[in-house]
Amino acid sequence: MSSEQQPAVHGANSDDAVVQEARAQLTDVEATAVSVSKFRVAGASLRRPDGSPFFDASFDAQLCNAVLPQEEQAALLGLFQDHMVAVLAMRTAEIDEHVMAAVGGGSSSGGGGANGSSSGSGANGSSRGVRQLVILGAGLDMRAWRLPLEVAGPGSSSDSGSGSSSGVTVFELDSGSTESLKTRVMGAAPPPSRCRRVFVQVDLEAPEQALERLRAAGWDPAQPSVFVMEGLIGYLTAAAGDALFRRLRSSAAPGSRLVLTTPPSAAWRDELQRTRGARLHHTTFEEPEQTLARVVAAGWSGAELRTAEALAAKYGLAENRQGVIVAVV
Ligand SMILES: C[S@@+](CC[C@H](N)C(=O)[O-])C[C@H]1O[C@@H](n2cnc3c(N)ncnc32)[C@H](O)[C@@H]1O
């Protein structure tokens, strides 16, 4: 990253008392976003089969280092490295690939190699040129900073009404507390040329109200969107998750797509508990096929599960625990 691309950093390190005070306000579930940020940064140092990086985690690292003291980072890795780091590398790269395919860009900012090469298959096609990226349970997601979402592609001349004619508007939905960390450290806006970013405070257990707030924040349901749920659905009750799948499906314009990671299985939860006394804060534990069936039941078309094993093979890593589901309207 060149020095011109460096964002304004208000909290340069984790000694920032305001950042630590904000962090202390996080609930256990919100705090999972901080841990995941660390695993994502660690995952970025792994390599794809062709030797290229998974993605550029420079912005993620700036945020993570400002929020999480070094000794806590080391402790997290000590406990979870073998379970989480490769998982985060693969799921983040896979979702980046689908997002970039939808907005009409060929590759994400950091990776070469497999990036963008196969995401045109299956659940996509007509949705290239999407100008609305909706990230549900965004936490410390840095896609608005990391991805080249200003990329102009086929269809980019049709203004979504929610941003510039060629740029993407990124709507980040979360319960609120992680946002104060992000804005304190990074400022509210990503690098000016990247995209427009809008934070929307919601409770995703109440999808109806969440969608109303999203609309009030400028989201245009008449234009296609990419909906991303990375590491989210297991934190919602099955009933709320189903309602969210249905509500998004009934509101989404043709050409929209859904990309989500599957929740942890009960077996993974039990293994973590048994082998290292670690407790996951999820509410819903299920097999990937069950999540896929819920997406299909909510009316999404062309739903496909990229299994943990398939992703491990694609990215050349030995072990994976999470699948990625893609679907379209
Ligand atoms: C494991 S973190 C994942 C964050 C981000 N997607 C990522 O992969 O880096 C889960 C996120 O979901 C959010 N979340 C969980 N339940 C939520 C709810 N009912 N309403 C809004 N956000 C919720 C948490 O606040 C947290 O930021």
Image (spheres, rainbow, N blue to C red):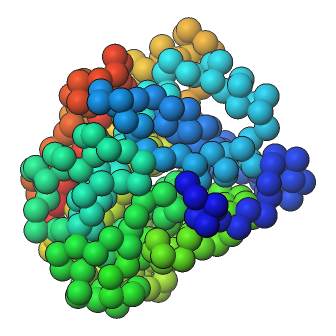
Relative to 237, is 190 above or below?
below
Position of residue 78 measured from the top left corner of the image (x, y, whole percent): 65, 18
Please identify the quarter of the rendering in which residue 151 is found: bottom left
Foreground of the two, 94 or 83: 94
Judging depth in this view, the residue of 167 and 177 nearest the camera is: 167
Report the front residue among 135 and 112.
112
Q: Position of residue 286 (x, y in %)?
A: 34, 32
**Whether residue 24 can be seen here:** no
Q: Which quarter of the image is occupied by the C terminus?
A: bottom left
Say how many tags the image has: 0
Q: Nearer the viewer, residue 83 or 48?
A: 48
- Res. 82 visible in picture: yes
159 to the left or right of 84: left
On the rendered structure, is 200 left or right of 158? right
Give the percent coordinates (x, y) of residue 143: 47, 58
Please tell me which residue is depicted at 46% across the width and 71% down the height of the picture: 194
Residue extending farthest to the top is 275
Percent coordinates x, y for residue 146 in the rendering: 48, 57
Using the rendered view, name the quadrant where residue 124 is placed.
Answer: bottom left
Rendered position, 157 above or below 185: below
Residue 321 vertical placement versus 184 (above, below):
above
Q: Which residue occupies 56% across, 9% down?
A: 275
Q: Would residue 124 appear left or right of 268 to someone viewing this image?
A: left
Picture residue at 28% right of the left edge, 46% below the top: 115
Position of the N terminus, as image quadrant, is bottom right
Q: Quadrant of residue 54?
A: top left
Residue in the picture at 38% in, 73% down: 150
Q: Is residue 181 left or right of residue 257?
A: right
